[in-house]
Amino acid sequence: MLYKFKSRATADVIMLEANGRQLLQIMGKSPDPHGIVTVAQIPAAIAALEAAIAADEKRDPAAAGANGRGAEEEERDAERANTVRLHQRAAPLIDMLRRSAAEEADVTW
């Protein structure tokens, strides 16, 4: 299944089920096949996503650098660098929410 987020203010944002479900749960929304983030709810949704991103970035051990590390640790860091982080997954949805708030448009899925 895919989540297709829609708003009159922007183009659609399409996400795989696992990623869409994660972002909906962060925003405090039910991961049902259909739902809405009203204009009044958008600021809280953006704040929740940004807080989750900040927490995810804080947990990232690769940000400390690779000085004095073994080859195995450097290899794990290289693998982490190739993974898609929460801030990358959430960026299109946050942009949609911001534009929708500016144009007073709800976001549905």
Image (cartoon, helix red, strand yellow):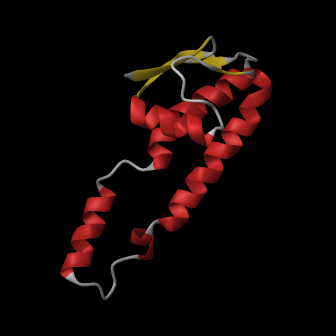
Image quarter where the N terminus lies is top left
Position of residue 106 measured from the top left corner of the image (x, y, whole percent): 69, 17
- Is 81 drawn above or below residue 74 in the view shown? above
Image check: 107 left or right of 75?
Answer: right
Question: Hey, which residue is sitting farthest left in the picture?
Answer: 71
Image check: 45 left or right of 65?
Answer: right
* Residue closer to the observer: 12 or 4: 4
- Is 19 drawn above or below residue 36 in the view shown? below
Quarter where residue 63 is shown: bottom left
Name the residue rendered at 56%, 52% in the picture. Answer: 53
Position of residue 62 measured from the top left corner of the image (x, y, whole percent): 39, 70
Image quarter where the C terminus lies is top right
* Residue closer to the observer: 54 or 28: 28
Image check: 78 left or right of 64?
Answer: left
Question: Hey, which residue is sitting farthest bottom in the picture?
Answer: 68
Name the residue rendered at 76%, 29% in the picture. Answer: 41
Position of residue 46 measured from the top left corner of the image (x, y, whole percent): 67, 39
* Residue closer to the observer: 92 or 29: 29
Position of residue 67 measured from the top left corner of the image (x, y, whole percent): 34, 84
Name the residue rendered at 60%, 42% in the picture. Answer: 26
- Is 100 drawn above or below residue 64 in the view shown? above
